[in-house]
Structures are given as C-alpha cells and as structure tokens.
Amino acid sequence: MIDEILARDLSAVEEAVRKAAAVEIMPRFRQLADHEVDQKSGPHDLVTVADRLAEEHLTASLTKLLPGSAVVGEEAVHADPDVYRALRAEAPVWIVDPVDGTRQFVNGDPAFCTLVALALRGEILASWTFAPALDELATAVRGQGAYVNGERIHSGSPEPGAELRVATAHPLYTTEEERRILARLEVPGVAVRPCGSAGLEYLKVARGEMDALAFNWPSAWDHAAGLLLIAEAGGTQSTVDGVPFRVDRDNALPFAVGRDEATTVRVRDLLRGA
C-alpha cells in the first residue's frame, strides 16, 4: 500500500494538503480574533484555531489515503507526548506541522507553510511543503528529486570565497547555552541571521537562496519534510557527532544543513568549536 501511494497517489496527498489550507488556514489569515490565538509553553509559543483544525483535517484525510498509518502532528503531541512514539513503530507515519511559522501567521506575514512528510521506520519517503499565501508547493520523493510547483530544483554550491549565508534557531526559542553554541558561527566569512519558518528556510537552502542552517531542537514536524527536500536537491546534513539527524532517535544537537557536503561540514565544525 505504501508503494502504491508513492507510485500513483501523490496527487491525492497534494490535494489533501491544499484542501486543509484552503478550508482551515487561509480563511483565517489576517482574520484571527484574539480568542483564536493561545499560548502553549510561553508568549512566543503560539497556537491558533487554524493550527488545530488544519491538523485535524489532515489527520483524517491522510489516514484515509493510507489505512493503518499513524499521524505525528505538532498539536497532537502537545496534547499527548506519547503520540511521538509512533515514529519508532513499524507502521507508516505522516509527520505534520499544520502551520509552520505560527508567529508569522498571527502577525499577518505570508511566510508560513504547511509541512507533511511520510516516514517508515525513521526513513523519510516523501514530503510536501506548501506555502499557501505565497502559492508555492515544494515536493520531494526519495530518489526522485525535489520540485517547486512542478519544476525541479537544485541546491548547488556557494560561490567560492563568498560569504556563507546561514540561518540559525531564533533567539526567542533558544536558551543561553544554545545561543552560546550558535554564536560560534559568528566568524569572518559567515553571515548569520535568525530563521523564520523552518520549512521555508529548508526550501531556501534547497533552492540555493541560503547556504546553510543550524538548528538545535529535535521536533520531527519542523524538520522531516525539509530534510528530504534538501537531500533530493543535492544538499546534506549532519549532527555535531557526525551522523545524520533522524526522526526516530535521539540526536546530538545542534545539527547543520548545507547546500553541499563541504558547507555542511564547515558549519558543523564551527558548531563543535573545532
């Protein structure tokens, strides 16, 4: 069944992602009432009615497309952390972030997206990154390349001698120790800025618009779709212990993502303090 959905039914997944955005997210964009925005862990960790309803919509539609599959969604895990264990089980898993970049969504900024990835035993098989307010859909299937609105993309390599453009975890979401480690990237030849929507930052690297990323949190819904997109566009990634980040295990953090192997290694080594 999973081979069948990868071979023939990807358009149905795309339709499900687009419909969830059209029904639950875009009608609320720049239309949110105060009571439709809540805090989770703190004032910078926001959730909206659009996040919750879009995840419910996707959970119903995606499990219908692949009977027997599970869903690991950001809001479901917030309600019940045990949901995350499905990533280490045998059933295929849909990994869902209904609104990646909720802060941007709440502020009326179009730079948010819906992230969906399909995984089996920790391997990411397919991914969808949909930015409805920007009308961009990035897709990837393992071994078949990365695409934006149907056109293949490649990450390429930075220009020799050019300043390396790196987006890192936003200071609002990092501890003092995490900021200290990320500050190791602030060296000559590297231009660092805080990231926005993680999914859209991954897309920028896959397109060659950014050179690298450095993240220090493990949430599968933020990374799964982008990691496959990067890999299929020609990029690489590595945790600080020198092995790839995986969604089905504990990872050494932070981890680096780059347009090519040399860029990833350079960022990873800086994070190590090497």
Image (tube, rainbow, N blue to C red):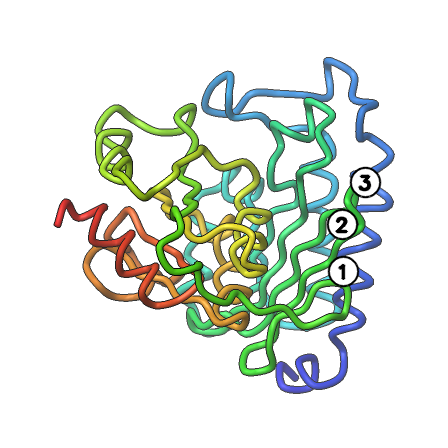
Q: Position of residue 137 (x, y in %)?
A: 73, 58
Which class describes the residues within 10 Å of circle 2: few (<14), some (14-19), or many (20+)?
some
Disc on res. 61: 1
Q: Residue 75 appears in which quarter of the rendering?
A: top right
Instruction: Please state the total of marks drawn on the protein image.
Output: 3
Q: Nearer the viewer, mark 2 or mark 3?
A: 3
Q: Residue at x 64, y 29 (%)?
A: 104
**Of the residues shown, which amino acid type is indicated by label 3?**
Glu
Which class describes the residues within 10 Å of circle 1: few (<14), some (14-19), or many (20+)?
some
**Left or right of 187 in this view: 221:** right
Q: Nearer the viewer, residue 11 or 150?
A: 150
Q: Secondary structure at mark 3?
A: helix
Mark-to-mark CA distance, 1 and 2: 6 Å
**Left or right of 105 in this view: 237:** left
Determine whether label 2 and label 3 are within 8 Å by CB.
yes
Quarter containing the N terminus: bottom right
Identity of the residue furthest to the front in this view: 161
**Of the residues shown, which amino acid type is indicated by label 2?**
His
Which class describes the residues within 10 Å of circle 3: few (<14), some (14-19), or many (20+)?
many
Q: Residue 264 appears in which quarter of the rendering?
A: bottom left
According to the image, label 2 marks what residue? 57
Q: Residue at x 23, y 52 (%)?
A: 252
Identity of the residue furthest to the left in this view: 274
Mark-to-mark CA distance, 2 and 3: 8 Å
**Of the residues shown, which amino acid type is indicated by label 1?**
Ser
Determine whether label 1 and label 2 are within 8 Å by CB.
yes
Q: Mark 2 vs mark 3: which is more N-terminal?
A: 3
Q: Position of residue 72 (x, y in %)?
A: 54, 54
Mark-to-mark CA distance, 1 and 3: 13 Å
According to the image, label 3 marks what residue? 24
Q: Nearer the viewer, mark 1 or mark 3?
A: 3
Identity of the residue furthest to the top in this view: 34
